[in-house]
Amino acid sequence: MANHKSAIKRNKQNQVRHARNNHIRTTVRNLVKAVREAVAASDKELAQQSLKVAIPSIDKCSTKGVIHKSTASRKIARLTKLVNTLG
């Protein structure tokens, strides 16, 4: 357990950031899952709508430092490619 005042504060900050990052990461995973399920159901319109929602949140996730920018780029590229296979 932290003994110094600064270490206690740092511990609190880490807990808050950890919770926020987990929430953001889970949300992104769910949005990606929605796109994949729409593609699996061969619903082109729903897949495109889901993709339009997923892309900005993936970008925001990388901007906040939750995931690396290359990871975000790769996810977006693969999802876009997947949706384009329907058309």
Image (cartoon, rainbow, N blue to C red):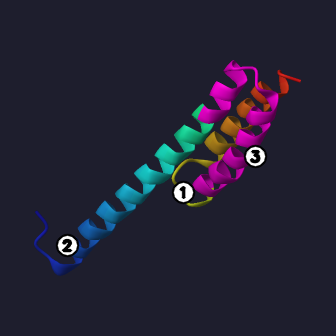
Q: Secondary structure at mark 2?
A: helix
User: In which quadrant of the rendered view does residue 41 lie?
Assistant: top right
Q: Residue furthest bottom?
A: 5
- Residue underneath mark 1: 65
Please tell me whether residue 35 belongs to the stretch shown in magenta: yes
Q: Viewed as shown, does residue 55 lie left or right of 28?
A: right
Q: What residue sits 60% from the left and 53% below the top? A: 62
Q: CA distance from mark 1 to mark 2?
A: 23 Å
In the rendered structure, are the residues bearing label 3 and label 2 in contact, judged by CB atoms less than 8 Å apart? no
Give the quarter of the figure containing the C terminus. top right
79 lies above or below 28? above
Report the amino acid beneath label 3.
Lys
Looking at the image, residue 66 sits to the left or right of residue 10; the answer is right
Secondary structure mainly formed by the magenta segment: helix
Provide the residue designation for mark 2: 8
User: Is 11 a magenta residue?
Assistant: no
Q: Residue furthest right?
A: 87
- Which part of the image, by quadrant, shows the N terminus? bottom left
Local secondary structure at mark 1:
loop
Q: Nearer the viewer, residue 2 or 23?
A: 23
What residue span does the magenta drawing correspond to? Answer: 34-62
Residue drawn at 64 percent across, 52 percent down: 57
The residue carrying pointer 3 sits among few (fewer than 14), some (14 to 19) or many (20 or more) residues within 10 Å by Cα, namely few
**Please, what is the three-letter code of the amino acid marked with disc 1?**
Gly
Q: Give x and y (percent) for residue 29.
A: 53, 39
Q: Which residue does the image show at 75% across and 20% down from the upper left?
A: 42
Q: Which residue is mark 3?
A: 52
- The location of residue 56, given as percent across then percent down, is 70, 53
Residue drawn at the location 19% of the way across and 72% of the way down: 8
